[in-house]
Image: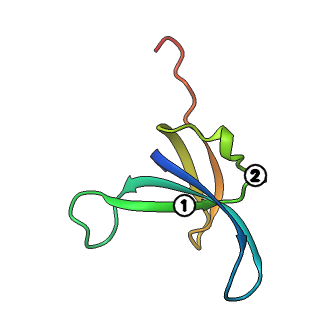
Amino acid sequence: MKIHVVGKLHLQGTSKKTGNPYDFIQVHYLGKAPGVEGSAALTLNLEPKNYPYDSIKIPGDYIADFDGKGFIVDFYPVPAVPGK
């Protein structure tokens, strides 16, 4: 599905509750959600090793593909259209 990314955040550290390390990128975009009139503010979590923070441009249009359980399987910029 095509999304328009309007924000990003790199979160990394150690959980105070469990002591486990975490490292992920949150991508923020507007989309549809059940019960929301208009657009909902949505987030998508990405692995930094697969989707480097600096490679995500703000604002930008991206294709986000999900598996049957709703987990991200691919995330890439919308290809440029030649001549536009």
Q: Residue furthest front?
A: 16
The total of numbered circles placed on residues is 2
Question: Which of 10/4 is in front?
Answer: 10
Q: Residue furthest bottom?
A: 17
Residue bearing mark 1 = 44
Circle 1 packing at 10 Å, graded few (<14), some (14-19), many (20+), is some
Question: Measured from the top left, where is residue 21 in percent x and y?
Answer: 77, 74
Q: Secondary structure at mark 2?
A: loop
Question: Which of 3/20 is in front?
Answer: 20
Question: Measured from the top left, where is residue 72 in percent x and y?
Answer: 62, 61
Circle 2 packing at 10 Å, graded few (<14), some (14-19), many (20+), is few
Residue drawn 49% across and 11% down?
83
In the image, residue 19 above or below residue 50: below
Give whichever of discs 1 and 2 has the lower sequence position: 1
Q: Is residue 61 left or right of residue 13?
A: left
In the image, residue 59 above or below residue 66: above
Question: Which of 53/19 is in front?
Answer: 19
Q: Is residue 35 left or right of residue 51?
A: left
Residue drawn 47% across and 38% down?
59
Kind of residue indicated by mark 1 = Leu
Q: How is the image coloured?
A: rainbow
Q: Residue furthest left?
A: 37
Question: Measured from the top left, where is residue 16 in percent x and y?
Answer: 68, 84
Q: Where, by quadrant of the figure, is residue 82 drawn? A: top right
Q: Is residue 9 left or right of residue 42?
A: right
In the image, residue 17 above or below residue 76: below
Residue drawn 55% across and 35% down?
78
Question: Measured from the top left, where is residue 47 in percent x and y?
Answer: 71, 59
Residue drawn 25% across and 73% down?
35
Kind of residue indicated by mark 2 = Asn
Residue bearing mark 2 = 50
